Image (cartoon, rainbow, N blue to C red):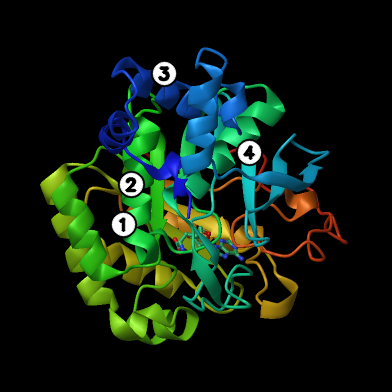
Amino acid sequence: MKKDILSLTFQELSDEVSALGFPKYRSAQIFRWLHKSGVRSFSEMTDLPLAAREQMDYNFVIFSCAIEKKLISAYDSTVKYLFRLHDGEFVESVVMKYKYGYTICVSSQVGCRMGCSFCASTLNGVVRNLYASEILSQLYAAENDLGVRISHIVLMGMGEPLDNYDNVLRFLQLVTDEKGKQVGMRHISLSTCGIVPKIYDLMEKDLQLTLSVSLHAPNDALRSAMMPVNKKWGVAALIDACRAYTERTSRRISFEYALVKGKNDFPECARQLAVLLKGMLCHINLIPVNEVAETGCKRSTPENVKKFADILAEKGYAVTVRRELGADINAACGQLRRSAEQMQPSENPKKTEVSSEVRISN
Ligand code: SAH
C-alpha cells in the first residue's frame, strides 16, 4: 500500500525521505511542491532527479480531488465544486469572494451522521471520514482551478469536523505550516454541532481559530427536536463547554442560529437565547434557513428575522444576519451533498434577500 504523503506532517515526511536515503534538503523541496504548489503527481517535481521522482511514486500516493462538476453563481460568482475522491466518493466545496479575499468552505466527511433536521448533508448518513490530505486537496484543487490564492477557510461543508477530530487537527497543522500553504490560524473557522468532549479537547490546543457552534435553539426540547446530537449533550453541557472555551482561549465563539419559520424564530426564543448566552464572549450569526426540499423547513420572514436580531441587539449582543451566497446553485449552508445527480442548479433560483452581511450591533 502506498502511503498518503499529503497527510504527513513535515517531520513525518522528513523521516520518510531520510529512510529512502535522500539528502535532508529534499524533504523541504517535496513539502513545498505538495503544499505550496499543490502538484498532483511526482513527475511535476522538476527539481528532483528522475530516479527520485520514480522512487517517490513507488512509495507514496498524492491524494487529489478531481473536478467532477463545477457551478458558478450568476448572482455573486460563488463557485461550487463537486469533487471526486480517489475511491469514487464525492464531496462538495464552495469558494466565495469577499472584500478581504477568497474563502473556501471545505467538507470534512463524506456525508454526515449527525441527522440535523434541516440539513441536506446528512440525508444519507455518513460514508467515511476524510483524511487530512483530502481536506487539503479541496483547497489546492480550487486554487489551481481558479488561479487565485484562497486566504480564508471555513470547516463548514459536509460533515461534522469534530466527529473526525484527529484528521481535522492534522489538516489544521498542515494548512497553517509556514513551510507549506501558511494560511493564518486566525483565518480559519471550525463549525461544530456540539460534540462537547471534543470542544474541551480543542480548548486544550489553544488554537487561534474561530470556533462556530451551531446552536439553532435556546432550550433542550426545541434543540433535541432539530438536532439529535442534543440528546447526548444537552444545551447546558454545551454552553458550559463554550464558556470554558472562551475563558481559556480568550477567543470569541460564533453561535450559528438558522431561523426556521414557526419553529425557532419566535421572539421568546430570542429572549431565551439572550439569557442563555449572558456574559459570554460571543457573536450571534442568524441564518434564515436555506430551504432543502426533503426537510420541509421554511425560512423565516424578513420581518421575523429582523425582530429576532433586534431583540438580541437590544440586549447588547453582536448579531449579524448571514448573507446567502450561491443561492442559484444550491451552495448555501446546509445544501451540500455528495452525489452528482443532485448537483443541479436550483430549480427556483431566488434573489438574495439580505444583500450583504449586516452588522446590526457591535
Ligand atoms: N457539522 C458542522 C458543520 C457543517 S454545517 C456543524 O453542524 O456546525 C455548517 C452550518 O450550516 C452549521 O451551522 C449548520 O447548522 C448550518 N446549516 C445546516 N443546514 C442549514 C440550512 N438548511 N440552512 C441554513 N444553515 C444550515
User: Do residues under tags 1 and 2 come within 8 Å of each other at their CB atoms?
Assistant: yes
View extreme (top): residue: 47
Does the CB distance between marks 1 and 3 fall below 8 Å?
Answer: no
Residue at the location (57% across, 15% down)? 46
As rendered, which of 315 and 295 lies closer to the eye? 295
Distance in Å between CA atoms under marks 4 and 3: 28 Å
Instruction: Give me the disc on residue 170.
Output: 2
Marks 2 and 3, the one that precedes in the sequence: 3
Per the image, the residue denoted by label 1 is 166
Residue 320 seen in the current view: no
User: Is residue 362 at least partly visible in the picture?
Assistant: yes
Q: Which residue is mark 4?
A: 95
Distance Cα–Cα, label 1 vs label 3? 26 Å
Mark 2 vs mark 3: in front: 3
Residue 14 as seen in the image, left or right of residue 227: left
Q: Residue at x 41, y 59 (%)?
A: 161
Q: How far is mark 4 from mark 2, CA to CA?
A: 22 Å
Of tags 1 and 3, which is closer to the observer? 3
Disc 4, SS: strand
Q: Name the amino acid type tagged 4.
A: Val
Residue type at tag 2: Arg
Task: Tell me if residue 30 comes above or below residue 66 in the rendering.
Answer: above
Three-letter amino acid code at the position of disc 1 = Asp
